[in-house]
């Protein structure tokens, strides 16, 4: 399969993409770095790049990939990356408190009835009788770092079930996968494209969905530096306009399935350049499609979910008690949802 051309994609997508062609552009071309993870849920950035939406608004985008959320937040603070897409973490909140980063939009979110994150257990745990999250009392739950989205999800699951789990920090997604495969940890919660491949290969078992516990969870957000927000608002708006076209394309092609086989295959080709790119596209297509979480339309902010996350960080003493919603989030760019 060859990568579909931009003209072909516009013909396929019709009003989905054409609605944004008049998006505000900055005065002259600007090179920017955009942080991402190699997840299907980051496909809006990939799509906006390869379909020329960033170029249309005057942005020359370089994708910079990370293995976890916290290093991306640090890269925003240092100026090495201009925009990021990742989960709220303790590290991000700490940097926001210092005036180094700011959330300004929403990205992937849990939505009952659509594909979302899965709760997995190792083969060893499954064989020992772990069949539901209630069976995870005293078990080892994999996280990247304390205060990561994995830590938040595990804690909320445990609180709902009235159990205690041991949280094992492993620094990166790759390390967590290896530990789950080997049985060094018992459980994990992860985006569906990774979950589906692990279960399909017989390396783990799915026992529940994250949306059963966090039905409106704002998993990932858009963030940048406060300096760009205050000094280059037009740049932030241009990024957001192009990114949102990628959101619309992704949701239409892989979540709502309104573009037919050609639209689906075109989107898979784009995602495959950065997700499971070491595998033949025929092999990668199933996990990519299975991993298609809803992206927030218009990058709207799940304010209630974000407030709950901040409450949890405070309750765990992972952030200062005086950190507020406004400390972390600038909601002047997008609506709440």
Image (cartoon, rainbow, N blue to C red):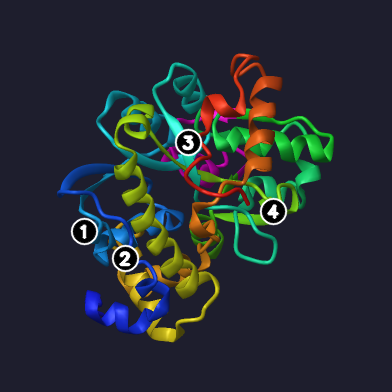
Q: Residues within 10 Å of mark 2 (few under 14, many from 20)?
A: few
The residues tagged by marks 3 and 4 sit, at their Cα atoms, a distance apart of 23 Å
Q: For marks 2 and 4, give the one nearer the viewer.
A: 2
Front of the two marks 1 and 2:
2
Q: Secondary structure at mark 2?
A: loop
SS state under label 1 = helix
Residue 303 colored magenta? no
Q: Position of residue 268 (x, y in %)?
A: 37, 71
User: Which residues, given as a range, are shown in magenta?
Assistant: 168-188
Q: Position of residue 278 (x, y in %)?
A: 28, 59
Q: Which residue is mark 1?
A: 55
Left-right relation of 67 to 152? left
What distance separates the C-alpha of mark 1 from that of mark 2? 13 Å
| Residue bearing the label numbered 3 | 103
Comparing 306 with 172, the one in front is 306
- Looking at the image, which residue is at 52% across and 67% down? 290
Residue 211: numbered disc: 4
- Residue 2 in view (yes/no): no
Let me know if residue 180 is in the magenta part: yes
Distance, label 3 to label 1, CA atoms, is 23 Å
Instruction: List x then y, in percent, for residue 194.
Output: 49, 55
| Circle 4/circle 1 CB separation < 8 Å | no
Q: Earlier in the sequence, mark 2 or mark 4?
A: 2
Q: Check if mark 1's residue and mark 2's residue have beta carbons within 8 Å.
A: no
Query: Which dot marks residue 8?
Result: none
Left or right, residue 180 beside residue 211: left
Numbered mark located on residue 22 in the image = 2
Q: Earlier in the sequence, mark 3 or mark 1?
A: 1
Q: Label 3: state its secondary structure.
A: strand
């Amino acid at each position: 399969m060859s990568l579909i051309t931009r003209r072909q994609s516009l013909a396929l997508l019709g009003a989905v993409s054409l609605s944004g062609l008049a998006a505000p552009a900055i005065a002259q071309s600007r090179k920017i770095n955009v942080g991402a993870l190699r997840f299907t849920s980051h496909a809006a950035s990939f799509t906006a790049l390869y379909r020329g939406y960033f170029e249309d608004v005057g942005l020359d985008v370089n994708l910079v990939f990370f293995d976890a959320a916290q290093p991306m937040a640090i890269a925003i603070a240092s100026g090495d990356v201009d925009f990021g897409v990742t989960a709220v973490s303790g590290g991000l909140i700490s940097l926001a408190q210092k005036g180094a980063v700011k959330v300004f939009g929403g990205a992937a979110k849990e939505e009952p009835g659509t594909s979302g994150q899965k709760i997995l257990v190792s083969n060893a745990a499954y064989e020992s009788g772990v069949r539901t999250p209630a069976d995870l009392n005293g078990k080892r739950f994999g996280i990247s770092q304390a205060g990561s989205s994995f830590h938040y999800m595990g804690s909320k699951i445990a609180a709902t079930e009235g159990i205690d789990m041991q949280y094992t920090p492993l620094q990166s997604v790759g390390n967590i996968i290896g530990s789950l495969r080997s049985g060094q940890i018992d459980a994990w919660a992860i985006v569906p494209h990774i979950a589906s491949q692990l279960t399909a290969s017989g390396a783990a078992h799915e026992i529940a969905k994250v949306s059963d516990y966090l039905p409106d969870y704002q998993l990932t957000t858009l963030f940048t530096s406060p300096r760009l927000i205050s000094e280059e608002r037009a740049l932030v708006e241009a990024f957001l306009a192009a990114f949102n076209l990628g959101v619309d394309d992704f949701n239409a092609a892989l979540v709502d399935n309104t573009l037919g086989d050609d639209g689906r295959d075109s989107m898979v080709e784009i995602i495959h350049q950065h997700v499971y790119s070491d595998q033949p596209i025929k092999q990668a297509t199933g996990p990519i499609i299975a991993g298609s979480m809803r992206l927030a339309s218009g990058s709207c902010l799940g304010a209630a979910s974000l407030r709950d996350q901040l409450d949890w960080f405070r309750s765990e003493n992972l952030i200062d008690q005086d950190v507020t919603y406004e400390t972390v989030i600038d909601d002047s760019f997008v609506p709440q949802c």
